[in-house]
Image (cartoon, helix red, strand yellow):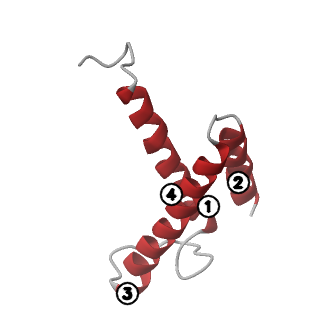
């Protein structure tokens, strides 16, 4: 539970430090729901993976938060690339 709390605090801080707080919150929530469904199908239905100490439906709580932040990270990286970042050559 400590790891889950740390991940939630980190993601909340990253959302609040961004410009589009409302949009980014929806992106994180969408990513968390999508990640939960994908992981639940992967562990419960198809059985292609398993975790040593799962919390709910065979997956750890923190993994859902990581999925949400992954979606947010993809959004931010795509905006950097679209803006013509000096680190990305077109």
**Mark 4–mark 3 distance (CA, rounded to whole Å):** 19 Å
**Mark 2–mark 3 distance (CA, rounded to whole Å):** 27 Å
**Where on the picture, by quarter, is residue 4?**
bottom right
Q: Residue at x 74, y 48 (%)?
A: 9
Tell me if label 3 and label 1 are in contact, CB under 8 Å: no
**Which comes before the other along the chain, label 2 or label 3?**
2
Q: Position of residue 2 (x, y in %)?
A: 76, 58
Q: Residue at x 59, y 48 (%)?
A: 24
Name the residue tied to disc 4: 67
**Mark 3–mark 1 distance (CA, rounded to whole Å):** 20 Å
Query: In terms of secondary structure, where does tag 4 sit?
Result: helix
Name the residue tied to disc 2: 8
Left or right: residue 45 versus residue 5 is left
**Which comes before the other along the chain, label 4 or label 3?**
3
Name the residue tied to disc 3: 45
Q: Is residue 70 above or below residue 40?
A: above
Query: In terms of secondary structure, where does tag 3 sit?
Result: helix
Query: In terms of secondary structure, where does tag 1 sit?
Result: helix
**Mark 1–mark 4 distance (CA, rounded to whole Å):** 9 Å
Q: Is residue 62 above or below residue 40?
A: above
Q: Position of residue 72 (x, y in %)?
A: 52, 46
Q: Position of residue 39 (x, y in %)?
A: 44, 72
Name the residue tied to disc 1: 62
Q: Nearer the viewer, residue 88 or 56?
A: 88
Mark 4 surroundings: few (<14), some (14-19) or many (≥20) residues within 10 A = many
Tell me if label 2 and label 1 are in contact, CB under 8 Å: no
**Which comes before the other along the chain, label 1 or label 4?**
1
Q: Residue at x 23, y 19 (%)?
A: 90
**Mark 2–mark 4 distance (CA, rounded to whole Å):** 12 Å
**Which comes before the other along the chain, label 3 or label 1?**
3
Q: Is residue 14 above or below residue 53?
A: above
**Mark 2–mark 1 distance (CA, rounded to whole Å):** 8 Å
């Amino acid at each position: 539970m400590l790891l889950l709390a740390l991940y939630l605090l980190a993601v909340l801080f990253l959302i609040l430090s961004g410009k589009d707080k409302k949009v980014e919150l929806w992106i994180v929530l969408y990513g968390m729901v999508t990640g939960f469904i994908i992981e639940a199908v992967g562990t419960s239905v198809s059985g292609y993976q398993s975790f040593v100490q799962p919390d709910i439906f065979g997956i750890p709580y923190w993994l859902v938060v990581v999925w949400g932040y992954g979606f947010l990270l993809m959004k931010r990286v795509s905006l950097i690339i679209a803006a013509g970042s000096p680190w990305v050559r077109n």
